[in-house]
Image: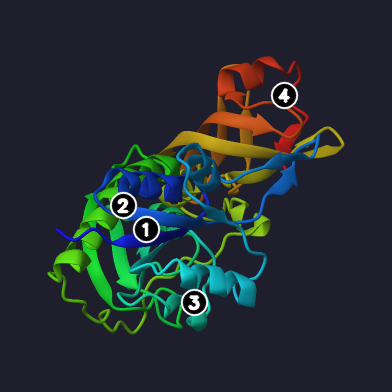
Amino acid sequence: MKSLKVIFFGTPEFAKTSLQAIYKSQHQVVAVVTVADKASGRGQKIHESPVKVFAMENQIPVLQPEKLRNPEFLEQIRNLNADVFVVVAFRMMPKVLFEMPKLGTFNLHASLLPDYRGAAPINYAVINGETKTGATTFFINEKIDEGNILLQEEIEIFAHENAGDVHDRLMEMGAKLVVKTLDGIAENSIREKPQPIMEHPKNAFKIFKEDTKINWHQNSENIHNFIRGMAPYPCSFTILKIGNDEKSLKIFSGNFEKSNHGKTPGTLEINKNQFKIFTTDGFYFPLEVQLEGKKRMSVKDFLNGFRDFDHISIA
């Protein structure tokens, strides 16, 4: 099989796993393109992306352009004479860049396209209660996540899983799919195909802070799936009123039950042994939480931190 010269574009851990798989394959990673280093945290320590860290550890050249249209950067890329570009969890690429390699530029997306195009496909698949999802490799074009499909693979979403669990399984499966796609391109054995036309494909728009607030005026199962789909990151939250103070409470996990309770959704029932929040058709039991200003903890530990429960409610 022909060994392809690859330039890899990516940033987070999800991308690093694919880079690692390519590096261990017969294909050659001639360079990595990743986000510029950023200062973060209290000490403003310089943070390097997981992709950069792996590349540096394995003597792979790293490029970190501020702008992808920068002429100097484009010339550097062109001079590497790569056969194909591989993109995993990176930003939108200009046409002048993705059209550069002779065998094309393909992306790994964590959904079964055309459903869940966008920035948060794993979160929304769990939020919507899907029982399956998957990964797709496709050639990049000028539209977001709409290029011709190369390969797809499906996995089951289990009822006990949150978005983080699905992320980790897709990360491993997707890495193998990337190498399989490179092998197919090298052997000329993959026939790309247009994405199916769907009138209303499911979307996976970027999630902002305001999108993570729990709406207790929904049924219990939808709330449960919402909390699963936001966990462990960015994590759903509600607002607790503790005396005269209002504090956010992140909820990482829990269970639900259905019942005819006659209570107003969002009503809180709390004591030293139980913490439940009423929904439209039952109630939700948080199991792992994080109160604003505190560390992540079990509900048991959370309840142990209070003496008087009567002055606590959902704001």
Mark 1 or mark 3: name the one nearer the start of the chain. Answer: 3
Spatial separation of the CA atoms under disc 2 and disc 3: 23 Å
Mark 2 or mark 3: name the one nearer the start of the chain. Answer: 3
Spatial separation of the CA atoms under disc 2 and disc 4: 47 Å
Q: Which part of the image, by quadrant, shows the C terminus?
A: top right
Please tell me the numbered disc located at residue 174.
2
Nearest to viewer (mark 1 / mark 4): 1
Mark 1 — residue?
Answer: 110
Nearest to viewer (mark 2 / mark 3): 3
Nearest to viewer (mark 2 / mark 4): 2
Mark 3 — residue?
Answer: 97
Label 2 sits on a secondary structure element that is: helix
CB of mark 3 within 8 Å of CB of mark 4?
no
Mark 4 — residue?
Answer: 309
User: Which residue type does callout 1 highlight?
Assistant: Ala
Colour pattern: rainbow
Label 4 sits on a secondary structure element that is: loop
